[in-house]
Image (cartoon, grey):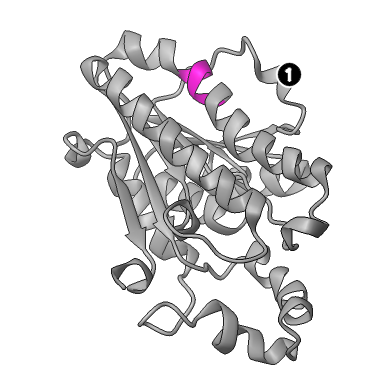
Amino acid sequence: MSARTALITGGAGGIGAACARELAARGVQVTVADVDEVAAKTLAHEIGGQAWAVDLLDSDQLDGLRLEVDILVNNAGIQVVRPIEEFALTDFRMIQTLMVEVPFLMVKAVLPHMYDRGFGRIVNVSSVHGLRASTFKSAYVTAKHGLEGLSKVMAVEGGPHGVTSNCVNPGYVRTPLVESQIRDQARLHGIAEERVLAEVLLTEPVIKRLVEPGDVASLVAWLASDDAGMVTGASYTMDGGWTAR
């Protein structure tokens, strides 16, 4: 993969950082795109890549953009945990913008180069919530289901041009995004914070642990490789058996 280039959104931390390190270890030249400029530059320096400090929520700046990369990892995401009747419209719209509109615009930006090269890998970091629903996550579940649909359309359109598009669907991953939910989940379920992991987050998986960022990165790297050339339009669960029920 040493001749390949990649762009990872939300690439400075959590799953994105793990993907950046994994792809770089395989010889890919990685651009770390993140709103946190310092973190993006620090990681880019570590892996010998590039940093792109960008506020993706300012999505108008992305329309008309052209990016010359071979691998796109749509990873940036946020979470708000509230009952529907308490969910602010601004928060709902923000999550749709970052997790549906931005992936669409990033795909739009990379396709001309990928089509010209006859090769492209689009990997969308979805979630078990792209396949299942949970309470208090209306915006997140909606966005991830939308991302699943976008990925499938991209697979159908891109296949004749050598471009694949797939989703990875982890359960709860040990990231700051998940850790930040614990307080909200404790409040909404009326339990102590130390009980959230066992009684809320890990009730559905049969393997009772959080997914590690490196687990997800290994799957992303495989989907980005030549070996996965016949894999497209798929959703790969990594949920400890959650969706097997």
For residue 51, which quarter of the picture?
A: top right
Segment colored magenta: 106-110
Magenta segment's dominant SS is helix
For residue 154, which quarter of the picture?
A: top left
Tell whether 165 sits left or right of 112: left
Which residue is rendered at x = 64% and y = 54% of the image?
138
Q: What element carries label 1?
A: helix
Q: Is residue 52 magenta?
A: no
Residue 53 in the image: above or below residue 171 = above
Percent of width and height locating residue 67: 53, 17
Residue 152 in the image: above or below residue 64 = below
Percent of width and height locating residue 57: 74, 33
Percent of width and height locating residue 104: 53, 26
Residue extending farthest to the front is 85
Quarter of the image for the N terminus: give it.
Answer: top left
Instruction: Please tell me which residue lies in front, 46 or 88.
Output: 88
Tell whether 239 sits left or right of 138: left
Percent of width and height locating residue 140: 62, 51
Amino acid on which the number 1 mark rests in the picture: Asp
Quarter of the image for the C terminus: give it.
Answer: bottom left
Instruction: Please tell me which residue lies in front, 8 or 150.
Output: 150
Q: Name the residue under label 1.
A: 60
